[in-house]
Amino acid sequence: MFGERHAAGKIGIGRFYLHRVFRIYPLYIAALAIISVGGGFTTRMLGNLLAYNIWSNPFDIVIPWSWSLSVELEFYAAIPLLILLIRGTRSALAAPIGFSAMTITWVLWVIFAYLQLANNSLIDFEIAGNRADLIRYFQLIYVAIPVRLTQFMFGVSAAWLVVYRADILVGLTPKRRLILVTVALLGAMIPLIYNPYTQLQPSDRPFLLFDLLFGRIGFALSVAITILLVGFGHLKGLKKLLASRLLEPVARFSFSMYLFHPVFVGLGIWIFVGKEPVATVGAMQNIGVLIVAITGSIALGFQSWHLIEHPAIRFGRRLRVKSRD
């Protein structure tokens, strides 16, 4: 999209959105249709179709793990607009700083307005049956746009630097490269300092507060730095791994695997574990479940790609060509 703006002076935002709709929605609608066979189509299903349940009530999501699809749609909706913000080196550096300040201000407001979010973990709310605060946590912190926009902005600025400031990045000295790798690793580990799915002890609260304020920002910064380093060959092993043809099926079938993999995990458990207590499950049983989950997900991904996703992408591409003409 940066290249498109550089060549034509503008971005085809409509074409971009059209491509994303035809890439995501055909298979997603098929998954929702399968689920609606048992429960019927209700207004709750409409919320899933439009992917807004995560902002209203995440407990209404009929495919529980598809909450992240709402975040993905946030990303696609915002990314062309964020690209338009970047006009030069100053804006590429200032925008992430400004968005980080917005995120910190937002989280501080949430913490002071809802002290229970800073004093309890998710498992504490779950044990107490406090669905209201569970919903509030997801709405105000986990998927809130003021939080997620900072992550998106770091990625956009990193992409801008890759496209327009290659001279700065190609000539990184070993010392500066080591500093950037260290910063990326530290930033990636910030969300790991606090586990929101354990009972919160008083000693955990400083880590929780630090994670709430800087976890998303630190992780977004680490990803952005990694993009820069990989893009200019400073992490050759990682770049080679990401470019491997062995990963092509994973990339192509990833959306189907994301939507349907729990079905095959359940099938593997039914075959290899049955009704045994979890504590008695052995290593070979876990391996069996893993094999069923991976092979089943890839096999279904192959079918859905050729029968649903690829035809939909080609149809959307023809529409974009017509709109360009």
Image (cartoon, rainbow, N blue to C red):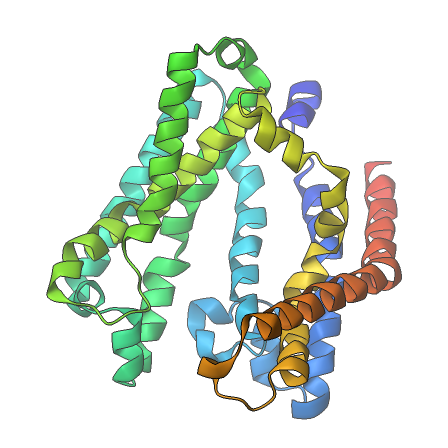
Q: Kindly identify the residue that appears in the image at 35 percent across and 39 percent down.
A: 187
Q: Kindly identify the residue that appears in the image at 75 percent across and 68 percent down.
A: 296
Q: Kindly identify the residue that appears in the image at 57 percent across and 67 percent down.
A: 66
Residue 292: x, y in percent? 70, 70
Residue 237: x, y in percent? 59, 29
Q: Does 176 sit above or below residue 325?
A: above
Left or right side of 245 for 273:
left
Q: Does 17 sit above or below residue 71?
A: above
- Residue 109 falls in which quadrant of the image? bottom left
Residue 164 in view, yes or no: yes
Q: Quadrant of the N terminus?
A: top right
Front-most of residues 145 and 234: 234
Front-most of residues 104 and 84: 104
Q: Does 263 sit above or below residue 86?
A: below
Left or right side of 122 for 267:
right
Q: Quadrant of the C terminus?
A: top right
Front-most of residues 281 and 111: 281
Left or right side of 171 for 23:
right
Q: Kindly identify the residue that appears in the image at 62 percent across and 30 percent down.
A: 239
Q: How many marks?
A: 0
Residue 319: x, y in percent? 84, 48
Residue 40: x, y in percent? 68, 90
